[in-house]
């Protein structure tokens, strides 16, 4: 199975409080993802040996339904389709430009 959005992809937020923002996917968590600079909340952190205490900004997960992949050509949001190659391998295709995403 080929995932619609993967770690390292540039995505566009199309819903919610951060609508219109773009960022890189840092981690995948099932049906949600953590995107750099998106869905940032303030958390109170207790001091320990490694980290200093205080109020920190932390990215929280966002549902994959609220994300669209950015087309590499013109940096516009696009839907993702899959295509099976002759050797049986599945690749992601940009619905906007028709180009392969996994190059």
Image (cartoon, helix red, strand yellow):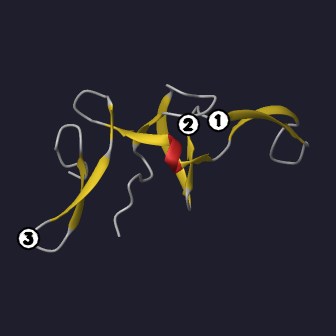
**Residue occupying image coordinates x 8% and y 70%:** 86
Residue 38 spot, x, y in % from top left: 59, 33
Q: Are marks 1 and 2 in contact (CB under 8 Å)?
A: no
Q: Quadrant of residue 70?
A: top left
Whole-angstrom CA distance, mark 1 to mark 2, is 9 Å
Please provide percent x and percent y for residue 34.
58, 46
In the picture as drawn, the residue positioned furthest to the bottom comes out as 88
Give the residue pinned by disc 1: 39
Q: Secondary structure at mark 3?
A: loop
| Mark 3 lies on residue | 86
The mark lying in front, picked from 1 and 2, is 1
Distance between the Cα atoms at labels 3 and 1? 40 Å
Seen in the picture, residue 55 relative to 103 is either above or below; the reply is above
Q: Name which of mark 2 and mark 3 comes first in the sequence.
A: 2
Q: Please name the residue that numbered disc 2 is placed on.
A: 36
Q: Position of residue 68 (x, y in %)?
A: 41, 40
Residue 46 vs residue 93: left or right? right
């Amino acid at each position: 199975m080929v995932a619609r959005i993967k770690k390292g992809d540039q995505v566009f937020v199309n819903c919610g409080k951060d609508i219109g923002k773009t960022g890189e996917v840092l981690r995948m968590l099932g049906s949600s993802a953590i995107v750099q600079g998106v869905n940032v909340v303030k958390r109170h952190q207790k001091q320990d040996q490694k980290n200093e205490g205080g109020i920190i900004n932390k990215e929280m997960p966002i549902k994959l339904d609220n994300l669209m992949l950015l087309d590499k050509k013109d940096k516009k949001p696009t839907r993702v389709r899959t295509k099976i190659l002759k050797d049986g391998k599945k690749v992601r295709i940009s619905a906007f430009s028709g180009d392969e995403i996994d190059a």
